[in-house]
Image (tube, rainbow, N blue to C red):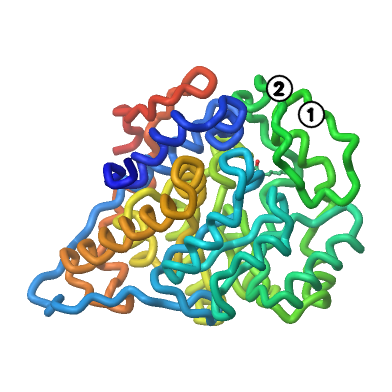
Amino acid sequence: PLSQCLNLYDFEVVGKQVLKPTAWAYYSSGADDEVTMRENSNVFGRIWFRPRILRNVSNINFATTMLGMKTTMPIYITATALGKLGHPDGEKNLTIAAGKTGIIQMIPTLASCSFDEIVDARINDQQVQFFQLYVNSNRAITEKIIRKAEDRGVKGLFVTVDAPQLGRREKDMRMKFDDTGSQVQNEGKDDVDRSQGAARAISSFIDPSLNWEDLQWLRSCTKMPICLKGVQTWEDAVLAAEAGLNGIVLSNHGGRQLDYARAGIEILEEVVTALKARNLWKPTFEVYIDGGVRRATDVLKAVAMGAKGVGIGRPFLYAYSAYGPDGVVHAINLLKAEMEMGLRLIGAPTLADLTPEMVDTRALGSHINPVPESHGSQIYQRLDTAIGM
Ligand code: HOC
Protein backbone atom coordinates (compact mmCIF):
# COMPACT_ATOMS: atom_id res chain seq x y z
CA PRO A 1 0.00 0.00 0.00
CA LEU A 2 0.90 3.60 -0.52
CA SER A 3 1.49 4.23 3.17
CA GLN A 4 4.40 1.81 3.06
CA CYS A 5 6.25 4.02 0.59
CA LEU A 6 8.57 5.84 2.97
CA ASN A 7 10.80 7.63 0.51
CA LEU A 8 11.20 8.29 -3.21
CA TYR A 9 13.30 5.19 -3.81
CA ASP A 10 10.33 3.06 -2.75
CA PHE A 11 8.32 4.40 -5.68
CA GLU A 12 10.95 3.13 -8.07
CA VAL A 13 10.56 -0.38 -6.67
CA VAL A 14 6.78 -0.16 -6.97
CA GLY A 15 7.04 1.40 -10.42
CA LYS A 16 9.06 -1.47 -11.72
CA GLN A 17 6.45 -3.89 -10.44
CA VAL A 18 3.43 -2.18 -11.97
CA LEU A 19 4.74 -0.83 -15.26
CA LYS A 20 4.64 -2.80 -18.49
CA PRO A 21 8.16 -3.78 -19.57
CA THR A 22 8.03 -1.32 -22.48
CA ALA A 23 7.06 1.55 -20.18
CA TRP A 24 9.64 0.61 -17.55
CA ALA A 25 12.31 0.41 -20.25
CA TYR A 26 11.45 3.87 -21.57
CA TYR A 27 11.14 5.65 -18.22
CA SER A 28 14.07 4.02 -16.46
CA SER A 29 16.64 3.96 -19.22
CA GLY A 30 19.73 6.13 -19.44
CA ALA A 31 22.20 6.67 -22.25
CA ASP A 32 24.87 4.11 -23.19
CA ASP A 33 26.28 2.55 -20.02
CA GLU A 34 24.10 4.70 -17.77
CA VAL A 35 27.13 6.05 -15.94
CA THR A 36 25.77 9.59 -15.86
CA MET A 37 22.36 8.39 -14.77
CA ARG A 38 23.83 6.62 -11.75
CA GLU A 39 26.27 9.43 -11.04
CA ASN A 40 23.38 11.91 -10.85
CA SER A 41 22.33 10.21 -7.60
CA ASN A 42 25.75 9.12 -6.38
CA VAL A 43 27.20 12.61 -6.51
CA PHE A 44 24.97 13.81 -3.66
CA GLY A 45 26.81 11.30 -1.47
CA ARG A 46 29.96 13.38 -1.84
CA ILE A 47 28.41 16.49 -0.29
CA TRP A 48 28.19 16.75 3.48
CA PHE A 49 26.48 19.18 5.82
CA ARG A 50 28.02 21.60 8.30
CA PRO A 51 24.98 22.08 10.52
CA ARG A 52 24.75 25.04 12.87
CA ILE A 53 23.31 24.83 16.36
CA LEU A 54 21.20 26.95 18.71
CA ARG A 55 19.43 28.81 15.96
CA ASN A 56 15.80 28.69 17.08
CA VAL A 57 14.35 26.22 14.65
CA SER A 58 10.86 26.07 16.21
CA ASN A 59 9.27 27.31 13.01
CA ILE A 60 10.47 26.07 9.66
CA ASN A 61 9.41 27.69 6.40
CA PHE A 62 10.57 26.50 3.02
CA ALA A 63 8.14 28.33 0.75
CA THR A 64 9.88 30.17 -2.06
CA THR A 65 9.38 31.55 -5.57
CA MET A 66 10.42 30.36 -9.01
CA LEU A 67 10.48 32.93 -11.81
CA GLY A 68 8.51 35.13 -9.44
CA MET A 69 5.78 32.55 -8.88
CA LYS A 70 5.00 31.21 -5.41
CA THR A 71 5.64 27.58 -4.56
CA THR A 72 5.38 25.72 -1.27
CA MET A 73 8.85 24.22 -1.64
CA PRO A 74 11.97 24.54 -3.82
CA ILE A 75 11.02 21.49 -5.88
CA TYR A 76 9.15 21.41 -9.19
CA ILE A 77 7.87 18.49 -11.22
CA THR A 78 10.13 18.44 -14.23
CA ALA A 79 9.04 17.53 -17.74
CA THR A 80 9.02 13.85 -18.67
CA ALA A 81 7.64 12.48 -21.93
CA LEU A 82 4.92 9.95 -22.70
CA GLY A 83 3.02 10.03 -19.43
CA LYS A 84 0.33 7.61 -20.54
CA LEU A 85 2.78 4.74 -20.71
CA GLY A 86 2.40 4.61 -16.94
CA HIS A 87 -1.25 5.48 -16.35
CA PRO A 88 -4.26 6.26 -18.56
CA ASP A 89 -4.51 9.81 -17.20
CA GLY A 90 -0.86 10.48 -17.95
CA GLU A 91 0.42 13.96 -17.06
CA LYS A 92 -2.94 15.01 -15.57
CA ASN A 93 -1.97 12.99 -12.50
CA LEU A 94 0.96 15.33 -12.03
CA THR A 95 -1.14 18.44 -12.57
CA ILE A 96 -3.61 17.41 -9.90
CA ALA A 97 -0.91 16.47 -7.40
CA ALA A 98 1.07 19.65 -8.06
CA GLY A 99 -2.08 21.70 -7.53
CA LYS A 100 -2.98 19.94 -4.30
CA THR A 101 0.49 20.37 -2.83
CA GLY A 102 1.19 23.86 -4.17
CA ILE A 103 4.22 23.07 -6.30
CA ILE A 104 4.90 23.90 -9.94
CA GLN A 105 4.60 21.41 -12.80
CA MET A 106 6.64 21.78 -15.98
CA ILE A 107 4.45 20.59 -18.87
CA PRO A 108 6.41 18.56 -21.44
CA THR A 109 6.27 19.17 -25.19
CA LEU A 110 6.16 15.40 -25.63
CA ALA A 111 3.29 14.77 -23.24
CA SER A 112 0.83 11.98 -23.92
CA CYS A 113 -2.12 14.16 -22.90
CA SER A 114 -2.77 17.18 -25.06
CA PHE A 115 -1.53 20.53 -23.78
CA ASP A 116 -5.12 21.67 -23.22
CA GLU A 117 -5.96 18.57 -21.20
CA ILE A 118 -3.03 19.24 -18.90
CA VAL A 119 -3.93 22.89 -18.46
CA ASP A 120 -7.60 22.06 -17.92
CA ALA A 121 -6.60 19.65 -15.14
CA ARG A 122 -5.39 22.57 -12.96
CA ILE A 123 -7.23 22.43 -9.68
CA ASN A 124 -7.77 26.19 -9.59
CA ASP A 125 -6.91 29.39 -11.45
CA GLN A 126 -3.94 30.13 -9.20
CA GLN A 127 -2.10 26.94 -10.06
CA VAL A 128 1.23 27.67 -11.75
CA GLN A 129 2.61 25.69 -14.67
CA PHE A 130 5.78 26.09 -16.74
CA PHE A 131 6.28 24.67 -20.22
CA GLN A 132 9.25 22.65 -21.49
CA LEU A 133 9.90 23.32 -25.14
CA TYR A 134 11.53 21.28 -27.86
CA VAL A 135 12.10 23.54 -30.83
CA ASN A 136 10.59 21.99 -33.93
CA SER A 137 12.37 22.06 -37.30
CA ASN A 138 9.22 23.80 -38.44
CA ARG A 139 9.56 27.05 -36.51
CA ALA A 140 5.97 28.07 -37.23
CA ILE A 141 4.81 25.08 -35.18
CA THR A 142 7.03 26.14 -32.31
CA GLU A 143 5.74 29.71 -32.44
CA LYS A 144 2.18 28.40 -32.31
CA ILE A 145 2.96 26.20 -29.31
CA ILE A 146 4.65 29.07 -27.44
CA ARG A 147 1.79 31.47 -28.12
CA LYS A 148 -0.71 28.91 -26.95
CA ALA A 149 1.23 28.29 -23.75
CA GLU A 150 1.28 32.00 -23.00
CA ASP A 151 -2.41 32.42 -23.83
CA ARG A 152 -3.28 29.63 -21.46
CA GLY A 153 -1.43 31.20 -18.56
CA VAL A 154 1.84 29.29 -18.51
CA LYS A 155 4.36 31.28 -16.48
CA GLY A 156 7.72 30.22 -17.85
CA LEU A 157 9.34 28.60 -20.86
CA PHE A 158 12.16 26.06 -20.43
CA VAL A 159 13.87 25.37 -23.72
CA THR A 160 15.59 21.99 -23.78
CA VAL A 161 19.10 22.40 -25.19
CA ASP A 162 20.76 19.08 -24.37
CA ALA A 163 19.04 17.00 -27.00
CA PRO A 164 19.94 17.96 -30.59
CA GLN A 165 19.92 14.22 -31.18
CA LEU A 166 18.38 11.44 -29.17
CA GLY A 167 20.73 9.67 -26.77
CA ARG A 168 21.17 5.95 -27.17
CA ARG A 169 19.00 4.23 -24.57
CA GLU A 170 19.59 0.59 -25.26
CA LYS A 171 17.10 -0.72 -22.72
CA ASP A 172 14.41 1.19 -24.56
CA MET A 173 15.73 0.28 -28.01
CA ARG A 174 15.41 -3.40 -27.23
CA MET A 175 11.67 -2.99 -26.73
CA LYS A 176 9.24 -2.85 -29.58
CA PHE A 177 7.12 0.21 -29.03
CA ASP A 178 3.66 -1.30 -28.89
CA ASP A 179 1.79 1.12 -26.62
CA THR A 180 -0.98 3.14 -28.12
CA GLY A 181 -1.45 5.67 -25.34
CA SER A 182 0.58 8.50 -26.79
CA GLN A 183 -0.72 11.56 -28.55
CA VAL A 184 2.58 13.37 -28.75
CA GLN A 185 2.56 16.92 -30.03
CA ASN A 186 4.35 15.75 -33.09
CA GLU A 187 2.02 17.72 -35.35
CA GLY A 188 1.21 15.31 -38.12
CA LYS A 189 4.48 13.45 -38.13
CA ASP A 190 3.19 9.94 -37.98
CA ASP A 191 5.66 8.23 -40.25
CA VAL A 192 8.03 7.61 -37.36
CA ASP A 193 9.83 4.32 -37.01
CA ARG A 194 8.35 2.70 -33.92
CA SER A 195 10.51 -0.36 -34.09
CA GLN A 196 13.38 0.95 -31.93
CA GLY A 197 11.83 2.01 -28.69
CA ALA A 198 9.53 4.77 -27.58
CA ALA A 199 12.11 7.52 -27.54
CA ARG A 200 13.17 7.11 -31.14
CA ALA A 201 9.56 7.11 -32.23
CA ILE A 202 8.88 10.59 -30.87
CA SER A 203 12.04 12.55 -31.36
CA SER A 204 12.52 12.99 -35.08
CA PHE A 205 11.00 16.48 -35.35
CA ILE A 206 13.48 18.23 -33.05
CA ASP A 207 15.69 20.86 -34.69
CA PRO A 208 19.43 20.19 -34.29
CA SER A 209 20.30 23.53 -35.90
CA LEU A 210 19.12 25.47 -32.84
CA ASN A 211 21.88 27.86 -31.71
CA TRP A 212 22.56 30.97 -29.62
CA GLU A 213 21.40 33.27 -32.40
CA ASP A 214 17.93 31.77 -32.22
CA LEU A 215 17.43 33.15 -28.73
CA GLN A 216 16.41 36.51 -30.10
CA TRP A 217 13.72 34.83 -32.16
CA LEU A 218 12.53 32.92 -29.09
CA ARG A 219 12.48 36.16 -27.10
CA SER A 220 10.37 37.80 -29.80
CA CYS A 221 7.79 35.00 -29.58
CA THR A 222 6.75 35.54 -25.97
CA LYS A 223 6.71 37.69 -22.87
CA MET A 224 7.11 34.63 -20.65
CA PRO A 225 10.42 34.29 -18.82
CA ILE A 226 12.74 32.02 -20.81
CA CYS A 227 15.22 29.55 -19.30
CA LEU A 228 17.56 27.03 -20.91
CA LYS A 229 17.22 23.47 -19.68
CA GLY A 230 20.30 21.30 -20.12
CA VAL A 231 23.20 23.69 -19.50
CA GLN A 232 26.30 21.67 -18.59
CA THR A 233 29.22 24.08 -18.23
CA TRP A 234 29.93 27.46 -16.62
CA GLU A 235 30.82 28.82 -20.05
CA ASP A 236 27.29 28.24 -21.34
CA ALA A 237 25.79 29.48 -18.08
CA VAL A 238 27.64 32.75 -18.60
CA LEU A 239 26.46 32.98 -22.21
CA ALA A 240 22.88 32.40 -21.09
CA ALA A 241 23.10 35.14 -18.46
CA GLU A 242 24.75 37.52 -20.92
CA ALA A 243 21.99 36.78 -23.42
CA GLY A 244 19.49 38.20 -20.94
CA LEU A 245 17.70 34.94 -20.26
CA ASN A 246 15.82 34.47 -17.01
CA GLY A 247 17.50 31.30 -15.86
CA ILE A 248 19.04 27.93 -16.56
CA VAL A 249 18.60 24.35 -15.48
CA LEU A 250 21.88 22.51 -14.95
CA SER A 251 20.78 19.17 -16.28
CA ASN A 252 21.95 16.20 -18.30
CA HIS A 253 18.41 15.07 -19.14
CA GLY A 254 18.27 12.45 -16.41
CA GLY A 255 21.39 10.77 -17.82
CA ARG A 256 19.49 10.00 -21.01
CA GLN A 257 21.57 11.98 -23.50
CA LEU A 258 25.37 12.22 -23.27
CA ASP A 259 26.85 9.53 -21.06
CA TYR A 260 29.71 10.84 -18.90
CA ALA A 261 28.13 14.27 -18.79
CA ARG A 262 28.55 15.59 -15.24
CA ALA A 263 25.69 15.88 -12.78
CA GLY A 264 23.90 19.22 -12.45
CA ILE A 265 24.80 19.50 -8.76
CA GLU A 266 28.45 19.02 -9.65
CA ILE A 267 28.37 21.87 -12.18
CA LEU A 268 26.55 24.20 -9.80
CA GLU A 269 29.66 25.34 -7.93
CA GLU A 270 31.60 26.33 -11.04
CA VAL A 271 28.54 28.08 -12.44
CA VAL A 272 27.93 30.12 -9.31
CA THR A 273 31.62 31.05 -9.11
CA ALA A 274 31.75 32.08 -12.79
CA LEU A 275 28.54 34.13 -12.58
CA LYS A 276 29.70 35.89 -9.42
CA ALA A 277 33.10 36.67 -10.93
CA ARG A 278 31.36 38.39 -13.86
CA ASN A 279 28.75 40.22 -11.84
CA LEU A 280 26.06 38.06 -13.45
CA TRP A 281 24.89 36.44 -10.20
CA LYS A 282 21.60 38.27 -9.76
CA PRO A 283 18.11 37.41 -8.50
CA THR A 284 16.85 37.99 -12.06
CA PHE A 285 18.86 35.02 -13.35
CA GLU A 286 17.79 31.83 -11.56
CA VAL A 287 19.81 28.64 -11.51
CA TYR A 288 18.07 25.29 -11.14
CA ILE A 289 19.35 21.75 -11.19
CA ASP A 290 17.75 18.40 -11.88
CA GLY A 291 18.89 14.78 -11.99
CA GLY A 292 19.10 12.12 -9.33
CA VAL A 293 17.32 14.12 -6.63
CA ARG A 294 15.64 11.66 -4.29
CA ARG A 295 15.90 13.17 -0.80
CA ALA A 296 15.12 16.58 0.64
CA THR A 297 18.72 16.64 1.82
CA ASP A 298 19.71 16.56 -1.89
CA VAL A 299 17.49 19.59 -2.41
CA LEU A 300 18.93 21.39 0.61
CA LYS A 301 22.47 20.77 -0.62
CA ALA A 302 21.57 22.32 -3.98
CA VAL A 303 19.83 25.32 -2.42
CA ALA A 304 22.73 25.92 -0.02
CA MET A 305 25.06 25.94 -3.02
CA GLY A 306 22.96 28.53 -4.83
CA ALA A 307 20.17 26.72 -6.69
CA LYS A 308 16.80 28.41 -6.67
CA GLY A 309 15.14 25.02 -6.83
CA VAL A 310 15.40 21.50 -8.20
CA GLY A 311 13.40 19.40 -10.62
CA ILE A 312 12.32 15.82 -9.94
CA GLY A 313 11.03 13.56 -12.71
CA ARG A 314 11.11 9.78 -12.63
CA PRO A 315 9.96 9.21 -9.00
CA PHE A 316 6.72 11.08 -9.70
CA LEU A 317 6.13 9.01 -12.84
CA TYR A 318 6.49 5.84 -10.81
CA ALA A 319 4.27 7.24 -8.07
CA TYR A 320 1.32 7.91 -10.35
CA SER A 321 1.87 4.77 -12.40
CA ALA A 322 1.16 2.82 -9.22
CA TYR A 323 -1.25 5.06 -7.32
CA GLY A 324 -2.52 7.87 -9.56
CA PRO A 325 -2.38 11.44 -8.22
CA ASP A 326 -2.51 10.22 -4.60
CA GLY A 327 0.86 8.58 -5.11
CA VAL A 328 2.40 11.84 -6.26
CA VAL A 329 0.80 13.80 -3.42
CA HIS A 330 2.23 11.23 -0.99
CA ALA A 331 5.69 11.50 -2.57
CA ILE A 332 5.61 15.30 -2.33
CA ASN A 333 4.41 15.18 1.27
CA LEU A 334 7.25 12.80 2.13
CA LEU A 335 9.65 15.34 0.67
CA LYS A 336 7.99 18.13 2.66
CA ALA A 337 8.42 16.19 5.90
CA GLU A 338 12.05 15.45 5.04
CA MET A 339 12.55 19.10 4.17
CA GLU A 340 11.23 20.31 7.51
CA MET A 341 13.39 17.89 9.45
CA GLY A 342 16.45 18.62 7.32
CA LEU A 343 16.23 22.37 7.77
CA ARG A 344 15.67 22.00 11.50
CA LEU A 345 18.65 19.71 11.95
CA ILE A 346 20.88 21.86 9.77
CA GLY A 347 19.91 24.93 11.76
CA ALA A 348 18.31 26.91 8.97
CA PRO A 349 14.71 27.91 9.72
CA THR A 350 14.19 29.32 6.22
CA LEU A 351 15.82 28.76 2.85
CA ALA A 352 17.45 32.18 3.16
CA ASP A 353 19.31 30.87 6.21
CA LEU A 354 20.78 28.04 4.17
CA THR A 355 24.18 29.31 3.08
CA PRO A 356 27.11 27.82 1.13
CA GLU A 357 29.10 27.42 4.37
CA MET A 358 26.56 24.86 5.53
CA VAL A 359 27.76 22.28 3.01
CA ASP A 360 31.16 20.67 2.72
CA THR A 361 31.81 20.11 -0.98
CA ARG A 362 35.51 19.24 -0.77
CA ALA A 363 34.92 15.72 -2.13
CA LEU A 364 32.71 16.90 -4.95
CA GLY A 365 35.33 17.11 -7.67
CA SER A 366 36.75 13.69 -6.86
CA HIS A 367 35.16 11.56 -9.49
CA ILE A 368 34.39 8.07 -8.44
CA ASN A 369 35.78 5.72 -11.05
CA PRO A 370 32.59 4.56 -12.73
CA VAL A 371 32.78 0.98 -13.92
CA PRO A 372 30.25 0.73 -16.75
CA GLU A 373 27.57 -1.78 -15.96
CA SER A 374 26.11 -4.05 -18.56
CA HIS A 375 23.03 -2.71 -20.26
CA GLY A 376 20.49 -1.31 -17.89
CA SER A 377 21.37 -3.17 -14.75
CA GLN A 378 19.12 -1.96 -11.98
CA ILE A 379 21.72 -2.31 -9.29
CA TYR A 380 22.86 1.15 -8.34
CA GLN A 381 26.29 0.09 -7.26
CA ARG A 382 28.31 2.29 -5.00
CA LEU A 383 31.79 2.28 -6.35
CA ASP A 384 34.69 2.63 -4.02
CA THR A 385 37.65 3.50 -6.19
CA ALA A 386 38.18 7.19 -5.75
CA ILE A 387 40.52 9.06 -8.03
CA GLY A 388 42.59 11.90 -6.69
CA MET A 389 41.47 11.72 -3.07
C1 HOC B 1 16.26 14.45 -29.73
C2 HOC B 1 15.02 14.48 -28.92
O1 HOC B 1 12.77 13.79 -22.93
C3 HOC B 1 13.32 11.52 -23.29
C4 HOC B 1 12.40 12.64 -23.64
C5 HOC B 1 12.35 12.88 -25.10
C6 HOC B 1 13.69 13.06 -25.70
C7 HOC B 1 13.66 13.63 -27.08
C8 HOC B 1 15.03 13.94 -27.55
O2 HOC B 1 13.04 10.39 -23.69
O3 HOC B 1 14.32 11.74 -22.62
Q: Which residue is mark 1?
A: 194
Q: Please report the residue visible at 18 percent of the width from the left and 68 percent of the height from the top.
A: 344
**Residue 190 in the image, given as x and y percentages of width and height:** 88, 39
Q: Quadrant of residue 14?
A: top left
**Residue 298 in the image, given as x and y percentages of width and height:** 34, 54
What element does badge 1 sit on? helix
**What is the distance, in whole Å, between disc 1 and disc 2 at their CAs?**
7 Å
211 relative to 154, above or below: above
Q: Quadrant of residue 338?
A: bottom left
What element does badge 2 sit on? loop
186 relative to 369, above or below: below
Q: Residues within 10 Å of mark 1 (few under 14, many from 20)?
A: some
Q: Please report the residue visible at 45 percent of the width from the left and 71 percent of the height from the top.
A: 102
Left or right of 321 on screen, residue 147: right
Q: Which residue is mark 2?
A: 176
Left or right of 31 on screen, residue 374: left
Q: Residues within 10 Å of mark 2 (few under 14, many from 20)?
A: few
Instruction: Tell how many labels.
Output: 2
Q: Please report the residue visible at 39 percent of the width from the left and 33 percent of the height from the top.
A: 13
288 relative to 286, above or below: above
Q: Which mark is residue 112?
A: none
**Residue 88 in the image, given as x and y percentages of width and height:** 61, 44
Q: Quadrant of the C terminus?
A: top left
From the viewer's side, name the closer residue of 46 and 34. 34
Q: State which tag comes first along the sequence, 1 or 2.
A: 2
